[in-house]
Image (spheres, helix red, strand yellow):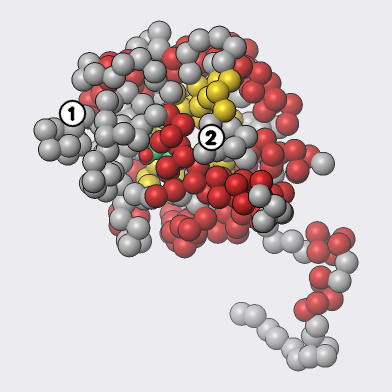
């Protein structure tokens, strides 16, 4: 029960009257270890390809990824998330590349683990970098993503990541039943401590545009995009059902995505389930801040820290953001 007195005995501004007291009474705190840095990787050596729609971010080869990992470690960032850019011609067969033990992601995991064993490695489980049309799964002739066929491939993909040494596999595909299928396969193969971060609540958002640019998965999605598997932005009860199923199927950590315009969902999910919860500050959110700041219309550092705090306030335990290095530098200062 909140007990209020009256003005002037009560003046709420007293606790805001100097910096030290503002710091002491702050209700939420952002830490460098809250941050996860998503990185785009590609084949080859010494490659750094800037992503136009995400100023400050690049697609990088594995040797450069190791430099980025070192930087994360120096800054105190504890984990990175890998997103592959697959440049080989994508025909119906190329989805097999998603579980190639000698593939781009699998090699990147091994290199990271060999060089930075203490840095957490999270991997994306979904087929969109590998399919010719950019959908997260196998489609039928009407471009409908087939659930159970896709799950079989996601299981293989997740196992290949686990075998390479991934700490957490992160299904972002939104198929029904994929968490259970992946968990069972991991258990059967002895990967008891390979965790699952489930993109439980992933909305069919227009904020993923720059990401799809970055990985080259924009072309063939068709008119309805990913709406037959990602959540309708009109819904919030459905977010509970998705989360409840993923937890029952063995998810260790759940995610809400995107961040800024879904804080109501994050708040409700965190308070209902009280589980470790991640928020993804997605490519479009990053691009909006960055581009406005680059034009001088917003103060980048200010709006960045404010955005991150809004996630903490709403209940996030972990924040995936392309601005992770920038945020870490600000916090370390
Ligand atoms: C695809 C995937 C997407 C993102 C992460 N994994 C895009 C999509 O669903 O089309 C989006 C991330 C971002 O926009 O930053 N499996």
- The residue depicted at 34 percent of the width and 49 percent of the height is 204
Q: Considering only vertical position in the picture, is 277 above or below 235?
A: above
Query: Is residue 325 toward the left or the right of residue 57 in the image?
Result: right
Q: Which quarter of the figure has residue 143?
A: top left
Q: Position of residue 95 (x, y in %)?
A: 27, 20
Q: Position of residue 78 (x, y in %)?
A: 63, 31
| Residue 181 appearing in the image | no
Q: Considering only vertical position in the picture, is 58 above or below 143?
A: above
Q: Secondary structure beneath disc 2?
A: loop
Q: Residues within 10 Å of mark 2 (few under 14, many from 20)?
A: few
Nearer-the-camera pick, 282 or 47: 47
The answer to whether the residue bearing label 2 lies less than 8 angstroms from the nearest atom of ligand 1 is no
- The residue depicted at 53 percent of the width and 34 percent of the height is 52
The answer to whether the residue bearing label 1 lies less than 8 angstroms from the nearest atom of ligand 1 is no
Q: Position of residue 216 (x, y in %)?
A: 39, 29
- The residue depicted at 30 percent of the width and 55 percent of the height is 232
The tally of labels here is: 2
Q: Residues within 10 Å of mark 1 (few under 14, many from 20)?
A: few
- The residue depicted at 11 percent of the width and 33 percent of the height is 141
Query: Is residue 226 toward the left or the right of residue 316 in the image?
Result: left
Point out the quarter of the image occupied by ligand 1. top left
User: Where does the C terminus fall, quadrant-wise?
Assistant: top right
Q: Considering only vertical position in the picture, is 92 above or below 265?
A: above
How far apart are the alpha carbons under marks 2 and 1?
A: 35 Å
Q: Position of residue 199 (x, y in %)?
A: 40, 42
Disc marking residue 52: 2
Query: Is residue 72 toward the left or the right of residue 99 in the image?
Result: right
* Residue carrying label 1: 149
Q: Residue furthest front?
A: 295
Q: Which quarter of the figure has residue 196?
A: top left
């Amino acid at each position: 029960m909140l007990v209020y007195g009256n003005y002037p005995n009560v003046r709420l501004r007293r606790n805001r009257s100097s910096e030290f007291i503002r710091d002491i009474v702050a209700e939420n705190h952002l830490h460098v270890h809250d941050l996860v840095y998503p990185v785009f990787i590609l084949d080859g050596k010494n490659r750094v390809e800037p992503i136009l729609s995400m100023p400050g971010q690049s697609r990088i080869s594995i040797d450069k990824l190791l430099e980025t990992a070192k930087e994360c470690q120096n800054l105190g960032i504890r984990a990175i998330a890998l997103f592959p850019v697959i440049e080989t011609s994508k025909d119906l067969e190329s989805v097999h590349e998603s579980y190639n033990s000698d593939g781009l992601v699998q090699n990147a995991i091994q290199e990271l683990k060999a060089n930075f064993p203490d840095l957490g490695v999270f991997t994306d489980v979904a087929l969109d970098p590998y399919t010719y049309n950019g959908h997260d799964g196998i489609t039928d002739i009407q471009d409908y993503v087939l659930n159970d066929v896709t799950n079989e491939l996601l299981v293989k993909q997740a196992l290949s990541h686990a075998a390479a040494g991934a700490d957490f596999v992160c299904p972002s595909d939104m198929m029904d039943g994929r968490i259970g299928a992946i968990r069972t396969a991991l258990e059967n193969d002895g990967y008891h401590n390979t965790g699952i971060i489930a993109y439980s609540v992933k909305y069919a958002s227009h904020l993923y545009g720059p990401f799809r640019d970055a990985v080259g998965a924009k072309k063939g999605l068709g008119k309805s995009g990913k709406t037959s598997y990602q959540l309708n932005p009109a819904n919030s009860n459905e977010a509970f059902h998705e989360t409840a199923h993923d937890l029952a199927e063995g998810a260790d950590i759940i995610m809400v995505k995107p961040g800024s315009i879904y804080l109501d969902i994050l708040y409700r999910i965190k308070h209902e389930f009280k589980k470790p919860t991640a928020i993804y500050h997605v490519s479009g959110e990053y691009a909006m801040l960055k581009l406005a700041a680059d034009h001088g219309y917003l103060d980048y550092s200010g709006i960045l820290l404010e955005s991150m705090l809004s996630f903490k306030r709403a209940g996030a335990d972990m924040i995936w953001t392309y601005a992770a290095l920038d945020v870490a530098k600000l916090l370390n200062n």
